[in-house]
Image: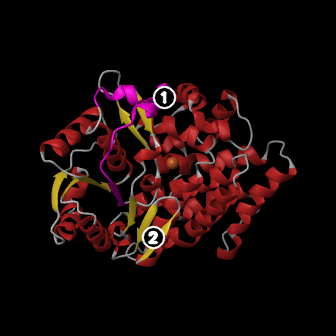
Amino acid sequence: MQQFNFPTLVYFGEDALVELATTIKAKGYQKALLVSDKTLSALGVVASVKSIITQQGIEVIVFDHVHANPIEADVENGAAVFNDQDCDCILALGGGSAMDVAKVIKVAATHPGPLSQYDDAIGGDKRIINAMPPLYAIPTTAGTGSEVGRSGVIILGKSKLKTIIFSPKLMPDIAVLAPQLTTGLPPHITAATGIDAFTHSLEAFLAPGFHPMADGIALQGMRLCIENLDTCVNQGSQIKARGNMQVAAMMGATAFQKGLGMIHSLAHPLSAQHNMHHGLANALLLPESIKYIEQSPLNSEQKQRIESVRQLFTASNLAKNTLSQTCHQWFHSLGITFGLRNYHIDEQHLAALADDAFADPCHQSNIITVSKADLLTVYRRAL
Ligand SMILES: [Fe+2]
C-alpha cells in the first residue's frame, strides 16, 4: 500500500480496497451508495467490492443501473436512492460511465433540478455551492483516468444532448487503484483502453503551452504504457503490469489538463455516430494523425517533441524510423486491425465525421493547427 497526492489522494495496491474500507469507517461514514453497472454485477465484481466494504461494518446500497453512455435518468434515479436510503458517501465502481454518473449524483442529491442548469457551457459550476458527500472512485479499467478527473458527461433526457458538468468539487476524494480488478479484462478491451491512456499522455505532451509538470507526467505515462501494455494484453493476470497500466491511465488523465489534440477530435465522432469504442477509435486514427503532423512544416521544438516520444520506444526495441510507423507497428502487435472500412465506415460517412471532428474542441490544443479539410484527409487515409 502506497499513498500519494497529486492532487487526488491515491490508494494503490492489492490492499487498497481494505484500506478504503478502513478510511470510510474512521471518517464515521455508515452507509455508502455503490454506483456501478449490470455487467460488473453479473461478473461478481460488485459483490466482491461490497463484501470488502461491509466487513468494516459499513452498509452498502448497490445502484447498478448506469448505462454505457450515461443518461439523465441514471443520475436522477441514483440520487433518489442516495436520499431515500440516507446514504452518506458514494463509491464509483467501473469505467468512465460509472465515475461520471457518481460525480453528477453528488450534485443532483444535494442541489435542485434540472441538471441542465449545471452545464459547464453556461457557467453551471457557480451553482454547485452546497455541501456534497465524499466520492471514492474505484476504476475497473486502465484507460480513461476518470478517477482523477473533475467532470461528468451526461446525455440530457429532453434534448438528447451531452451536458458536461465540470467543477473541482466533483474530483473524487480518493482514487482507489486495485490492480486485481482489471485482470479479468479481455485482451481487445485491455489494448483499446490502454491505447486511450497512451493517447492522453501523447497528446498532452505534444500540446503547445508551458506545463512542465504535465510534460513530465505524460512522458512517464507513455513509458509505462510502452513497457506494460503488451504484458497486460498477452498475460492478463500479471498483476504488476496491470498495476502499472492503472497508474499510466491515471497519469494520462492528470497530464491532459494541458490539452489534447486532433486524435481525440477525430475519435469522438466515431463513437457518437458509429458507437465505436473510444480507445479503438484513438488506435485507428493515431498513426495517420501523427504521420500528417510529421509531414507538416514543423519548427525545431515540435520536431524535438515528436522525436522524444519516438525515443521512448528504443528501450523496448519497438522504435521504427518515424513515430507514426512505430505506433502503427506497436498497435498492430497489440491486436489492432487497422482500416475504418473494417468497422463499416465508408467514404460516404467521412464528411459528417469531419464536421463533428472540427466542432470538437480537442484539436484546438493540437501541436499544429488543423482545418476541417485536414481532418477529412486523415479520415480518408485511415479508411
Ligand atoms: Fe480518451
| Residue 299 drawn above or below residue 50 | above
- The three-letter amino acid code for the residue at tag 1 is Gly
x and y, in percent, of residue 21 in the image: 26, 68
x and y, in percent, of residue 153 in the image: 40, 38
The image quadrant where one finds the C terminus is: top right
The answer to whether any part of residue 82 appears in the image is yes
- The three-letter amino acid code for the residue at tag 2 is Cys
Q: Determine whether, in the image, residue 317 is placed left or right of residue 121.
A: right
The image quadrant where one finds the N terminus is: bottom left
Q: Find out whether residue 77 is within the magenta segment.
A: no
| Residue 113 drawn above or below residue 11 | above
The answer to whether any part of residue 273 appears in the image is no
Residue at 68 percent across and 28 percent down: it is 373
Residue at 47 percent across and 74 percent down: it is 241
| Closer mark to the observer between disc 1 and disc 2 | 1
Q: Residue at label 1?
A: 123
Q: Quadrant of residue 65?
A: top left
Q: Report whether the residue tagged 1 is closer than 8 Å to ligand 1.
A: no
Element assignment for label 1: loop
Q: Residue at label 2?
A: 232
Badge 1 crowding class, 10 Å Cα cut-off, few under 14, some 14 to 19, many 20 or more, is: few
Residue closer to the observer: 153 or 359 = 153
Cα–Cα gap, marks 1 and 2: 41 Å
Element assignment for label 2: helix
Magenta highlight range: 112-140
x and y, in percent, of residue 151 in the image: 44, 43
